[in-house]
Amino acid sequence: MAKVSKDTRIGELLMIDENVAPILINIGMHCLGCPASQMETIEEAAAVHGIDADGLVEDINDYLASQA
């Protein structure tokens, strides 16, 4: 099972499971296709969007675990 951390880059995250995209879009991260966003970490992207990075990582890991 894949697991991510706050240091995982958005591009890597989407390569792990592209179906994570709706989680990010639903919290306002609409720029997933932007080349610059691909290099941001989950923590950096969360900070830009005013989201708690720890909670976001937990939500993503819960989703990934449910797909295993």
Image (cartoon, rainbow, N blue to C red):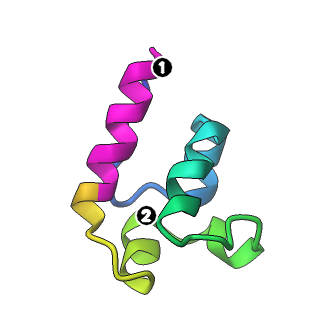
Looking at the rendered structure, the kind of residue marked 1 is Gln
In the image, taking residue 29 as reference, residue 53 lies left or right, namely left
The N terminus: image quadrant: top left
Span shown in magenta: 56-68
In the image, is residue 15 above or below residue 39? above
Question: Per the image, is 5 magenta?
Answer: no
x and y, in percent, of residue 43 in the image:
36, 69
Amino acid type, label 2: Ile
- Say whether residue 4 is visible: no
Quick check: 12 left or right of 2?
A: right
What residue is disc 1 on?
Answer: 67
Q: Quadrant of residue 42?
A: bottom left
The quadrant the C terminus occupies is: top left
Look at mark 2 in the image and give the residue it sits on: 42
Q: In the structure shown, which secondary structural element does the residue marked by tag 1 occupy?
A: helix
Please state which of residues 62 and 16 is positioned toward the viewer in this rendering: 62
